[in-house]
Image (spheres, rainbow, N blue to C red):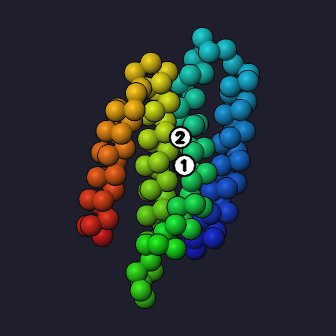
Amino acid sequence: MSGKKVSALSMFLAILAWLGLYFLVNSFSPKTSARSLFFPLLFVALTTTFVPAAFYLNYRFAKPKGEAVNNWRPIRQSGWAALFLVLCAWLQMLRALNWIIAALVLAVFSLIEVFILTRE
């Protein structure tokens, strides 16, 4: 699939995920078991929202001369960004988030992505 098709599909899935998250937040009490669906829905919504931006940034900056960029790279990078934000939201819910922890988690995720990029 081309980057444009994946971006269009991800935007459709992002709209569905954000609508599901809106329905979940507005329809259920925080004391119910709906909290178990909040973080996966947030992850899917954020990942699918970041995919078009990641495709654009990889097309603009990471494309080597004469080589095609792997279509999984922007999806993986969107997943890393969404995982970081979901982890920050979970830590904030526990009142354990501060800027040092956020910076350390961001550094770890960045180092993992750099390791993956150097092995491609």
Q: Quadrant of residue 25?
A: top right
Name the secondary structure under disc 1: helix
On residue 47, the disc is 1
Residue positioned 62% across, 56% down in the render = 10
The residue labelled by disc 2 is 43
x%, y% of residue 11?
67, 56
Crowd tier of the residue under label 1, counting other residues whose Cα lies within 10 Å: few below 14, some 14–19, many 20 or above: many
Report the residue at 71% width, 32% height from top: 22
Q: Residue at x 71, y 47 (%)?
A: 15
Whether tag 2 and tag 1 are in contact, CB under 8 A, the answer is: yes
Question: Which quarter of the figure has residue 116?
Answer: bottom left
Q: State how far apart marks 2 and 1 are (Cα).
A: 6 Å
* Type of amino acid under label 1: Thr
Instruction: Name the residue furthest bottom.
Output: 66
Residue 29 location, quadrant: top right
* Residue at 30% from the left image edge and 59% from the top image edge: 114
**Which residue is at the front of the view, 98 or 37?**
98
